[in-house]
Amino acid sequence: MDLVLGVALWASPPCVKFPGLVVAALARRRLGAARRRRDGRAASSAASSADDGVGVDVTWREVSMTVRNGRTGMTRRVLDACSGTARAGRLVAIMGPSGAGKSSLLNALAGQVPESARVMLTGVLRANGADAGDGSGFRKAYVQQEDALYSMLTVRETLETAAKLGGSKDVKRTTETLLNDLGLAACADTRVGDAKTRGVSGGEKKRLALGVQLVGAPSVIFADEPTSGLDSFQAEKVMKTLSKLAKEHGKTVVCSIHQPRSSIVDLFDDLYLLADGRCAYFGPMSSARDWFENSADVTIPNDVNVAEYLIDIVSIDATSAETTAETSKRIDRIVKAMASNPPALAEDDVSKGLSTASDALALTGKRVGFWGQFPLLLKRSWRQVTRDKATNKVRLLTSLNSAMVFGSIFWKMKLTQTAIQDRMGLLQVSAINAAMSALMKTLTSFTKEKVIVNRERASKAYGVLPYFTSKLVAELPVGAFFPLAFGACVYPMAGLHPTLGHFARFCTILTVESFSSSALGLAISSIAPSTEAAVAMGPAVMVLFIVFGGYYVNQDNVPIYFKWLNKCSLIKWAFQGLCVNEFQGLKFETKRPFDQKTGEDVLERLSFQDATPLSSLRQQGNILSFLYLLTLYLLDTNAPKFAVMQPPPV
Ligand SMILES: Nc1ncnc2c1ncn2[C@@H]1O[C@H](COP(=O)(O)OP(=O)(O)OP(=O)(O)O)[C@@H](O)[C@H]1O
Ligand SMILES: [Mg+2]
C-alpha cells in the first residue's frame, strides 16, 4: 500500500507531489502513534491506578544517569545510584553545588530527561509502589526553570485557557481557586508581559507557571529552581506557595534549589543533598544538623545557614591538588556514611491521609477534541497577535518607512527606456522587502512560542493540527496588513501601472509572498534549536532565493542542477508575477531601433513571456502549502521525546 501510494505521488505533478508526500508521511506517523497508544493503553491504565487522588509517594532506587561525550567518546556519570522517597504532603528540596546533578535528578524523576543516544538513564521509579519508570502512573506537574507563557494574555486568561484545555469541570471556579491559592488575585487582569511590554513580576510569573501546571490536578509537583532569578522576597513567596500545596493539599513536592535563605530552608520537610551525582544526605531537614554531627563527623556552626553550609561541605575545592584531594575525601566519607547509616525518615504523618483531588481542580476526565481546542487556541493566538502593539507598531513603521524610501527613490517613474530598469529594480526590492520582513518576524517569534507549545504538547494539552491551523487563521489579517500598507504607499508614489486591477494584483502578490516567507520562517524555526540558530539559517536560505529571484540570473541561464532552486524561490515567483502585472500592456518611448517598445518585449527579455499573474500566484500557493505541511510535519516529528528509565543493571 505504501509502495503504491509512494509511486503514485512520485509520478504526480509537483503541486500535488510535495504536499501529498508530507500528508502521507504525517498520516503514516499518526497511524503508527495511534497503534502504539492503543497497545500501551492497557499498560498505562494499570499504572495510573497508583494515583488514586489520596496522595502519591514517589520512590526511586539506584537512579543513575550517564552521558557520553560525542567528541571524545568518554562517558561521564552524572547521577550515581541515587535512592530516596518523596512523600505526599511533604516538600523535598534537592540541593547541591552547581553541576552536582540536581536538575538531572529532578528531570529523571519527572520523566523529563530529553531522549538522546548519548544519555543512559537507569533505575527504578515507583508511585505508591507501582512501577512508574515509563513516566506514567501518576499525575504530575513539571515547572521549568524558564517561564514560557503567552506574554499578551492576562494572568486570568492564561489560567482559564489552561483549565479549558485541561478539561476542567468548572473553569471559573478552578481559575478563581488558583488565583487565590497562588496569591495572584491582585494581578489577575494584568498581562504576563515580556521584554517589550511590562507585565507581572518575576515571582508572579513563576507562580502563574505553577498555576498552569496545577490545572491538571497533579498529585506530584516537580519544580526546577523555582526561585532562580527572583529577589529573596519573591523567592520566599514562591516557596511558601509550594509548601502550602504540600501541607494543605497533600501534594508531593520535589524541587531543586540553589542557596536558599534561612526562612526558605525552614519550609523544607526533607533534604536531598547531592555531591557530584551521589547522595550525600537524604532525610528530614530538621535532622540534618544532628546527622552530620553524629554520623558524618561534620560540625555545623550555630550561626550559619545550614543549607548553605552543607552545600559548601559537599563542594570540591579545586584551588590546588591538596584541597581537591582533601575535599574529595571528605565527600567520599559523607556519601559512605549516608549509605551505611542513613537518618530515620520522619513519621508518615500526612502521607495518604489527605486527598489531593481538590474538587475545585477536578477534571471532567476527558480533554476537549479538535473542535474544542481550535476556538480556544484561535482566541489565544488572536489575543497574542493583536495585543502586541509594540511589535505591530514597529512592523507598520518599517513597512511604511521602506515604502517611503522606495517611493522617493523611484518617484513617479516615466515610460522612458531607463525607467524599465527602475521598474524592475523596484519590483525586485519590493519582493525582497516583503519576504525578509515576514521571515525575520516569524523566526524571532516562533522559536520562542515553540517552547510553550512543546511544553503544552508534552502534557498532551492539544494536538499539533488544531494549534497550527488556529495560529495561521489568527495571524492572517495582521500578517496581510503590513504588505498591504507597503503596497498602498509605494504604488502611487512610484507611479506604477495606474489601474485599480493592477494595484490589487500587486498587493495580492506581495501578500501571498509574505505568507510564503512567513511559512518558510515557521519551517526553519521548527527545526532550529534556538532563536539565534533560526536567525542565522533563515537569511542564508533567503539569499539563495534572492539570487534565483529572476532579476540577477535570467531563468533560462540557470544551470540545470540549480533549476530546482529556481523553482523553489518564492522571490522569483513574486517578482515574475509583479513584472507581468506591471509590464503587460505598457508602451515605452523609443529613440533607437533596438529600444524595447512594449512591456511584452521586456517580459520576453526576462523569459517571463509565458507567465501570467495567476500562474505566479498558483506557484506561490504551492510553495506556501508545501511549507505549511512541512512545518506541520516537523512540529509533529520534532515533539520533545523523553528517555524512559531502564531497569538498573543486575
Ligand atoms: N544531556 C546532557 N549532556 C551532557 N551533559 C549533561 C547532560 N545532562 C547533564 N549533564 C551534565 O551533568 C552535570 C549535572 O548537570 P545538572 O544540570 O543536573 O546540574 P545542577 O546541579 O542542576 O547544576 P546547576 O545548579 O548549575 O543548575 C553537569 O556537569 C552537566 O553538564
Ligand atoms: Mg540545575
Image (tube, rainbow, N blue to C red):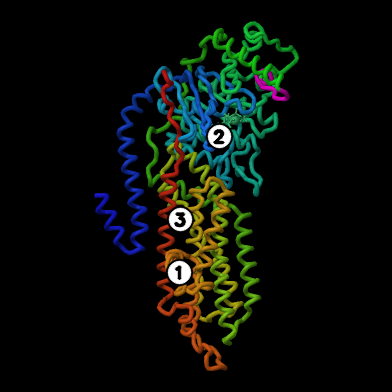
Residue at image point 32% right, 36% down = 36
Q: Which residues are magenta?
A: 311-320
Q: Position of residue 158 (x, y in %)?
A: 53, 41
Going from N to C along the chain, the mark reached first, 1 or 2, is 2
| Residue 390 visible in the current orientation | yes
How far apart in space, not on screen, are marks 1 and 3 (Cα)? 39 Å
For ligand 1, the image quadrant comes to top right
The disc label shown at residue 559, or none = 1
Marks 1/2 in contact by CB < 8 Å: the verdict is no
Q: Which residue is mark 2?
A: 144
Q: Secondary structure at mark 3?
A: helix
Looking at the image, tell me whether mark 1 or mark 3 is earlier in sequence order.
Answer: 3
**Quadrant for the C terminus in the image:** top left
Q: Earlier in the sequence, mark 3 or mark 2?
A: 2
**Residue at the spot 56% in from the left edge and 78% down from the top edge:** 423
Residue that badge 3 annotates = 473
Are there few (<14), some (14-19), or many (20+) residues within 10 Å of tag 2? some
Report x, y in % for residue 33.
34, 40
Say which element carries label 2: loop
For residue 190, above or below residue 123: below
Badge 2 amino acid: Gln
Amino acid, disc 1:
Pro
617, 119: nearer the viewer: 119
